[in-house]
């Protein structure tokens, strides 16, 4: 059995339930730890293992965590890798530098595993979270001015920036090429269009 056949079996048998709950957004989601716990018995069954490592990459004045998940066939040592990125926030209230890095690492690792193990979170945690943020923004604006439409020029949040970065990674696109003026400078309407376009590219790439 080749490493690809083993990976296919692990992908088809893996169960990674959404054990976490976001009380603010009122949705369930799975963490990196949940994915790994679900993967361990399936990996052992098929004679395979997964390792994850983090690397730091600097692009301009931005710091990114690059997570790489490697799937090993322990019978012959062959492997398959997948990577994902998450940008560190310059600062986050209530967090020191190590916590900010840790948060970015967890985010990158989760999306890295999602790509490797074919776990599609575009239908749950992160897409729901981004949608909830957009809905909350619209409701907040409506409370201020019930007759006003959603502001079209409001800049997107750091979480939405990170989501686009990971969608670009999954689609095999360079963030700097896709967003030459900077992903953090997108407006809410541009963000929605970018998500739709990138998800279409991902589906085409993954043959869905």
Image (cartoon, helix red, strand yellow):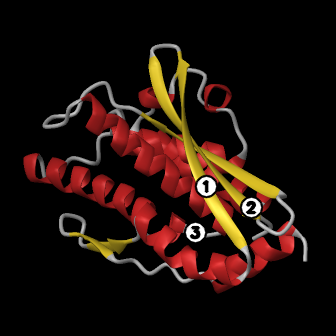
Q: Secondary structure at mark 1?
A: strand
In the rendered image, the vertical position of residue 86 relative to residue 90, given as above or below: below
Q: Which quadrant of the figure has residue 189?
A: top left
For disc 3, the marked residue is 120
Please name the residue shown 12% across and 47% down the image.
Answer: 145
| Nearest the eye: 198 or 162 | 162
Please name the residue shown 45% across and 62% down the image.
Answer: 32
The disc, 3 or 1, on the residue closer to the chain's N-terminal end is 1
Which corner quadrant holds the N terminus?
bottom right
Q: Secondary structure at mark 3?
A: loop
Instruction: Report if the CB atoms under discs 1 and 2 are less than 8 Å apart.
Output: yes
In the rendered image, the vertical position of residue 43 relative to residue 205, given as above or below: below
Which numbered disc covers residue 51? 1
Residue 166, how many percent across, how many down? 55, 46
Q: Is residue 189 visible?
A: no
Residue 202, how many percent across, how many down? 69, 56
Residue 75, how many percent across, how many down? 83, 69
């Amino acid at each position: 059995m080749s490493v690809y056949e083993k990976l296919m079996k692990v992908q088809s048998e893996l169960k990674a339930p959404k054990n976490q709950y976001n009380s603010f957004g009122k949705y369930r989601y799975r963490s990196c730890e949940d994915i790994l716990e679900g993967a361990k018995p399936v990996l052992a069954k098929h004679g395979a293992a997964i390792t994850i490592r983090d690397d730091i990459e600097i692009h301009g004045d931005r710091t990114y965590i690059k997570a790489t998940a490697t799937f090993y066939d322990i019978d012959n040592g062959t492997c398959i890798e997948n990577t994902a990125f998450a940008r560190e926030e310059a600062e986050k209230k209530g967090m020191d530098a190590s916590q900010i890095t840790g948060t970015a690492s967890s985010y990158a690792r989760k999306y890295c595993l999602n790509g490797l193990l074919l776990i599609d979170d575009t239908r749950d945690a992160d897409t729901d979270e981004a949608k909830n943020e957009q809905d909350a923004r619209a409701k907040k604006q409506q409370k201020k001015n019930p007759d006003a439409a959603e502001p079209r020029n409001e800049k997107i949040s750091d979480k939405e920036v990170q989501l686009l970065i990971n969608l670009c990674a999954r689609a095999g696109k360079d963030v700097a090429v896709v967003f030459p003026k900077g992903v953090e400078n997108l407006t809410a309407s541009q963000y929605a269009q970018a998500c739709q376009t990138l998800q279409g590219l991902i589906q085409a790439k993954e043959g869905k």
